[in-house]
Amino acid sequence: PCDGIDQGDHLTMARYLLNRVGECFGCVVSFDPKPIPGDWNGAGCPTSFSTLPMRTAPGGFGIIRECMVKLERRHVEHINAYGEGNERRLTGMHETAHIDTFSWGVGNSLGHLRVSRTTEMLDAGFLEDR
């Protein structure tokens, strides 16, 4: 685990090391969200995140709900920033949401964003970008 601001550095370094190890073994690394075509869900790298107000009860769940409204407004912009190939993964099948429709829910693994039932119950916690 690391602080949020360090995650980008850790991910960049991990990808660098993975590529270097791949070179040593004659392998090519792919970060494609669905590198092999077919009837399966691909890999989206689900990421859980929160802010201090989200983790603070009472009221954290309300902050998360406000966040969802804001995220929905910029859904297309965010999807475009995720990179190429996600249209092959986000089909609305295999526990994925459809790329064109923003969705979220408590305990819902079919949405773009999921909030745990515990977060709702405690009125504080995190959300998962799927």
Image (cartoon, rainbow, N blue to C red):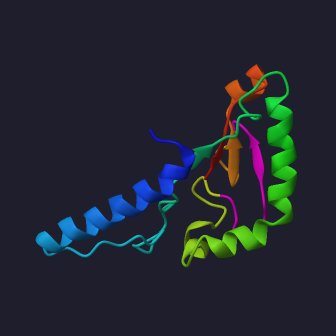
Q: Quadrant of residue 31?
A: bottom left
Disc count in the image? 0
- Magenta stretch, overall SS: loop
> Where residue 86 sits in the image (x, y, percent)?
58, 72
Q: Is residue 63 above or below residue 79?
A: above
Q: Is residue 22 left or right of residue 38?
A: left
Q: Is residue 62 left or right of residue 37?
A: right
> Where residue 64 sits in the image (x, y, percent)?
79, 40
> Where residue 85 sits in the image (x, y, percent)?
54, 77
Q: Is residue 75 above or below residue 65?
A: below
- Residue drawn at x 77%, y 34% is 53
What are the residue bounds of the magenta stretch? 97-107
Q: Is residue 81 above or below residue 106?
A: below
Q: Is residue 73 left or right of residue 98?
A: right
> Where residue 91 sits in the image (x, y, percent)?
63, 67
- Residue situated furthest bottom in the rendering: 84
Q: Is residue 41 magenta?
A: no
Q: Is residue 100 magenta?
A: yes
Work out which quarter of the rendered image holds the N terminus and state it: top left
- Residue drawn at x 55%, y 79% is 84
